[in-house]
Image: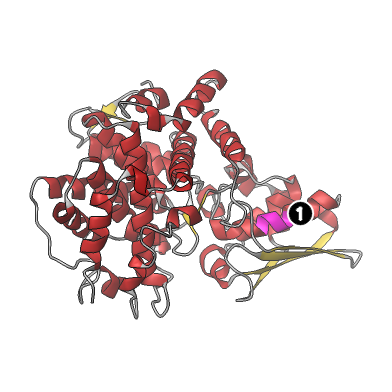
Amino acid sequence: MSDITHKLAAFAAQSQRQDLPDAVWHDGRRAFVNYVGCVLGGCREPGTSISLKTLARFAGPGEATVVGFDRKLDALTAAFVNSTSSSVHSFNDTHFQTVAHPTSPVAAALLALAEIRPISGATLIHALILGIELQCRVGQMLVTLPAQVSDGLSMAGLVGCIGAAVAVGRAIGLDTDKMTTAIGIAANQSAGLRQAHASMSSHFTAGNTSRAGLLAALLAEDGFSCGSGMLEGPKGFAACYSSHPNPEAALVGLGTHWEILANAHKPYPCGFVIHPVIDACLKIVSQHTLDAAAISDIHLTVNPLVLTLCDRPSPNNRLQALVSTQHWAAVSVLHRQAGLRQGTEEQVHNPLVAALRAKVRMTGSESYGRDAARADITLSSGETLSADILHCRGSEKRPMTDGELDTKFLDQAATVLTANNALELLRASWVVDTEMNAGTIMRQIWPG
């Protein structure tokens, strides 16, 4: 078997800017803009506040910014809290094939690093791209046939720490051998269970992976050692987290085919497999004026993964609603929108929403991809209104435009910043790769 870990490490350590196509570079900038919006949108949520309260008691020197709070903490803790913030609305990006959420842990670790060690904005974007790319490729070891991974394992938790380690390792200039070690130390910390979904511990996963990856790279830099073949070895990452693992899948098209281009930015703040359902429901209500009381049945035909991950007919709180297909179908039909305001506690307990949720039933079908769904809304008159979605908004085939990312950014930033400050930050985020010192962007994200 090829030395997968070493080859991936060499790719990251030796990568040059000219090796990255312009489209890949632009997607790195898009990922950064999306991350900054998400960290602002989630910085005042309870999961973020509790994480800060607990960890601050053990934090080291105040060197790195915690977005949303007027204090600084050590870089490891700041990376944890900021990565947590960016995931609390489930608005962070998704790599459809692996179901990884790659940018949150990588960007949080890099920005924490940028405050303790000067790196340029171009170095940050380059490292961000590599961290996203390699963690998605490592995830492919577990899901590319004949490999199969348990639905109970959080892919974000398994590979996010590896992506953060690669990115930080590239930013601090690790050579191939030390990058190999950093990947190994990160893989040794891989963890995450989907049983934690619909709770604050789901967001803990994003925070933990960022901290773990940053720590892995810094340990490797200082000479900490790790076993060889940590990804592909007989007792390594792929063998332990997948049945019939396919380690070679991580190398297919390396350097010529870019997985970051298949990384999807979410138009809706919920689990990504719900998005085609939302699109289908919104398509119907955009074409018809419906009285919710006249709806007798909402039948959804979805990819089977929707049933596995997001079948929650009666969510009790906002966190459960984030991964409730029934909730988002109901609010999409009732409010003709599916944004942050439709995922609040108030909407979870809205009697009209609850009544519509009770009318939703789902059928899984392998003929529908993860970005596809069908909605059939039957009225009390007997009439049925239908919509098929082949590729949902935000998917690889229908990516969000830069303008749509701007709107998403500003909507989230408006929760904590003035309109002028939000607009200035948006502009700065798009051109962070021109900054001589990437750490300055954190003072714009949160002056503190």
Decide whether the magenta segment is chiefly helix, strand or loop.
Answer: helix
- Residue at image mark 1: 283
Label 1 secondary element = helix
Would residue 208 be counted in the magenta stretch? no
**Horizontal relation, residue 265 to residue 25: left or right:** right
Examine the image and state in which quarter residue 324 appears.
Answer: bottom right
**Horizontal relation, residue 169 to residue 330: left or right:** left
Split into 4 quadrants, where in the image is the C terminus? top left
| Residue at screen point 52% across, 30% down | 413
| Range shown magenta | 277-281
Find residue 259 and report its horizontal and vertical position in percent: 44, 57
Residue 57 makes an appearance in the image: yes
Mark 1: few, some, or many residues within 10 Å (few <14, many ≥20)? some
The one of 199 and 12 positioned closer to us in this rendering: 12
| Residue at screen point 33% across, 63% down | 138
Against 344, residue 166 (above or below) is below
Examine the image and state in which quarter residue 277 appears.
Answer: bottom right
Against 143, residue 291 (above or below) is above
The way the protein has been coloured in the rendering is secondary structure
| Residue at screen point 39% across, 59% down | 136
Residue 50 makes an appearance in the image: no
**Horizontal relation, residue 36 to residue 401: left or right:** left
Would residue 279 be counted in the magenta stretch? yes
